[in-house]
Image (spheres, rainbow, N blue to C red):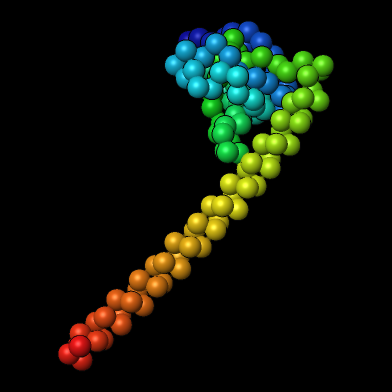
Amino acid sequence: VVEEVKLKPPSKEFKIGQAVRLGGLLKAPHLNGKRGLVQRLSTQDNDRWEVEIRLDRGVLEVKSIRSENIVAVPRNQAAEWQLEEARFTQERQKREKEDKRWNEEQEKSKKFNTFRNVCEKTLNAQGF
């Protein structure tokens, strides 16, 4: 006989894409106050939601967060949230540009060092 397991419904309902803030996190207090967007109900735990969290410097990270630690952004704060989202997007674009520039510099440095090593080996082989 197969016993049917009934999952308890989540203690809070959220919509996909809903703007939220995190709070009351004890194991990850650095995430308290962070903004995020609800992605989906967790497949592992019916009282957790996958939330795309906005971190510093425009970094995004998806974490599984308990319903009790998620607060929906009220409509009267929507404009403020959108302003913060615009700033976050600018930070992310700036970071991506800086990362690209840094990677390009690293690549140039590798090529220069390879060229220098070849030159040194050639000069050493010729007795210089």
Residue with the most extreme left position: 127
Question: Which residue is depicted at the point 67% across and 27% down?
Answer: 37
Position of 74 compared to 54: left or right?
A: right
Q: Name the side, left or right, on which 90 lies relative to 34.
A: right
Q: Residue furthest bottom?
A: 126
User: Measured from the top left, where is residue 72 in percent x and y?
Assistant: 71, 16
Which residue corresponds to the image point at 49% horizontal and 58% vertical from the top-left? Answer: 103
Residue 95 image offset from top left, x and y in percent: 58, 46
Q: Say which of 27 and 39 sits in front.
A: 27
User: Is 25 positioned to the left or the right of 77 in the image?
Assistant: left
Residue at coordinates 71% horizontally, 24% vertically from top-left?
Answer: 19
For the image, the number of numbered tags is: 0
Q: Which part of the image, by quadrant, shows the C terminus?
A: bottom left
Q: Residue furthest front?
A: 128
With respect to residue 85, does 64 lie above or below?
above
The reply to whether residue 48 is in sight is: no
Q: Is residue 57 visible?
A: yes
Task: Answer with the quarter of the image where residue 112 lies.
Answer: bottom left
Q: Quadrant of residue 63?
A: top right
Q: Position of residue 48 (x, y in %)?
A: 57, 17
Q: Position of residue 23 (x, y in %)?
A: 58, 14
Residue found at x 47% / y 20%: 28
